Image (cartoon, rainbow, N blue to C red):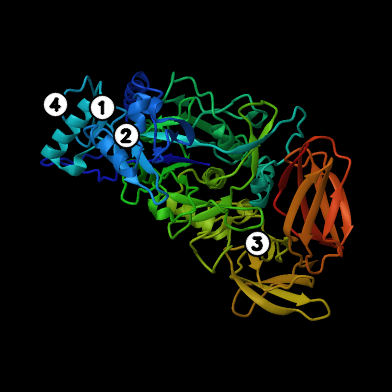
Amino acid sequence: MFFMLLFMGMTCVPLAGQAAVSPSVTQADADKVADLVSDNWQNDYFEETLVTPGSGQVEVDGKTRSFARQFDVSPAEASQAVQSQGTIDAYFRESGGLYETERRKDGKVAVTAPFQMQRLVVLARINETYGAREIVHTQNDQDTILQFDSQEKTRAAYEKIIARYGENSCYPDQYVQLFDAASYAASDSLKAGHPYSWGVRIMQMDKLKEQAADRNDLATVSVAMIDSGINQNSFFFDGRTIHPSSRSFISEPWDITDSLGHGTHVAGVIAEATPANVQLMILKVTNASGKASFLTIREAFWYAISHNANVINFSMGSSNASDMDILDKVIKYAIRKRIPICVASGNNKANVKYTYPANNDNVITVSAMTASGTLASYSNYGEKIDFTAPGDRIIGASKWNDNGLVMYSGTSMASPHIAAACSYIKMLRPSASVNLVVDELKRLSVDLGAKGKDKKFGYGCPVMGTLFQTNILSKEKNYTSKPKITSILNMNKAVLLTWTPVRGAKQYLIYRKKAGGSYSLVKKVSADRLLWYDKKTKSGLRYSYKIKAKLSSKKYTGYGNKAGLVRLKVPGAFRASTAGGSISLAWKKAKGAGVYQIQLSSYADFREALTYKLSGKKTAARIPNLAGGTYYVRIRSCKKSSWSAWSAVLERIVP
């Protein structure tokens, strides 16, 4: 999921003759701006209306309605206006600048209304009203907000202000529209403690959460989520503290109820991934229709800082905004306050350099990966990507059912996984700088794409399971005299090894052998890393590993334990179809597989799953006699005690 903002690009600078002022955070701005926005809110705001020449129907933010109804004109006038691209442009030119049009390659005309909120932000403290009926001076940004009672007056004031102070001195407030897509699965009986998100498992934060329960030296951390609110009654939040400073910026301050579901799911990811000492600061900025004002978002950031948030998650953004810098001041201030900001990269399948604030150098920008370790098809990419995290088909907390689950996909789901990872580092040292937090994430990341930082995955996906034993922040480390392999896993593209630290180690030397061969040195790993991704393996072959530590130029430890597996990949091209009360499955053979294991469940988290085992020679199967309903199915390859990763989950409805 991703929130789409469409703002005019601009530079926030002091007006001529006025000096820049360093911010001093005040809470009063939040109340003033929230009241101003909510008191003047109208439900007919739109982000973009697409007009098709020759058609009386238009598409308003994804919904179809008539041109006449949308623009309050007679059917005859509407018919004349939509005859061609030229007549559409001409019709809106006559609005006196209240509407802007853009011809698209598909023949449609995109219509926007930049002054519909009847509100201007002037990037300095001024006292002249320019005909506004309300005026607010903010302390945090040292700017002036002017509220008018018509679009015409707003447009006229805008022209006067930029003529006097310059083109970049003022901009109209815009609104945010939430676009949502989710498949929903509910249940009344839930298995306590189950990690529903596959992302929590693959990042090993379920293990870290168990380890945290045995420690009494971890600080309380608050994670601010600027989103659509929360369903506090979801079982995901049992025993979890909702920060007392949580508030709404769009309704009554105390009303943080989620009417959309997005915020609940985002909060659920963090809650499932972290222990109870992580508090959730819910900052609600969207109304019941999924819309928000840019001003409320900006003030929510200042509010999070003023209420001592340790981490901020922002699963929103603005596309087509390569030159935007609206939030830069508050972002810089957060960095000075040592608060990491995790931001979704966006779901446009485009370069993230056009998405704001994901393209800001001071935020942690997150792309979305699938369960098979590939970049999600919708995820943005580019040099600004810092890390990747699970974002596809994430099961989590439901707004609609206190005991139910909901499945979402999007970079909005990936970002809170990284926010949760940041919160663990902040538990160990609340004063850690953002740079130090990022260094820890980099150290723990599994490189998924091209070697080093790349445009799809950044530095990779952090695997957090060894943080408490190996982190550079903690005073206590669980050393062993020899490096002990703690896990060996078949991932989609390689074998993943993790091991225990050795005190005084300068380097770790990894030895590997294939079946029937002998051990040879395959990798030297620096002492600050306790995991390695072996990409040079072949499917169907058995590999064994052992590790020793280098203590000095001539001194080494002995080898720890040995661990091995058969290299297996996920069966390819997994597909499913339904007919006559059955599900038919097909897949491509995975080299080396002795058996295929298939799981089928009516629950998205595979509780109460039926498990089927088929010969490794099979490439198809049929599951008959199924009652009508929704089913989830997945497959993996097996040989003896070795397993591949699970395939992506397929959801099918049996009529």
Say which amino acid is labelled 3: Pro
649 shown above or below 160: below
Residue carrying label 4: 128
Mark earlier in primary sequence (1, 3): 1
Whether residues under marks 1 and 2 lie with C-beta atoms below 8 angstroms apart, the answer is: yes
- Residue 226 on image: x %, y %: 46, 35
* Gap between marks 1 and 3 measured at Cα: 65 Å
Mark earlier in primary sequence (4, 3): 4
Residue carrying label 2: 113
Quadrant position of the C terminus in the picture: top right
Say which amino acid is labelled 1: Gln
Left/right of residue 206 with respect to residue 189 in the rendered view: left
* Gap between marks 3 and 2 measured at Cα: 59 Å
User: Would you call the spot at circle 1 few (<14 residues within 10 Å), some (14-19), or many (20 or more)?
Assistant: some
User: Would you call the spot at circle 2 few (<14 residues within 10 Å), some (14-19), or many (20 or more)?
Assistant: some
Residue carrying label 1: 151
Which one is nearer the viewer's eye here, 332 or 251? 251
Mark earlier in primary sequence (4, 1): 4
Q: Answer yes or no: is residue 205 visible.
A: no
Determine which quarter of the picture holds residue 495. Answer: bottom right
Which one is nearer the viewer's eye here, 588 or 373? 588
Name the residue at 18% across, 41% down.
14
Which one is nearer the viewer's eye here, 149 or 455? 149
Say which amino acid is labelled 2: Ala
512 shown above or below 466: below
- Tag 2 secondary structure: loop
- Tag 3 secondary structure: loop
Mark earlier in primary sequence (4, 2): 2
Which mark lies nearer to you, 3 or 2?
Answer: 2
* Gap between marks 4 and 2 measured at Cα: 25 Å
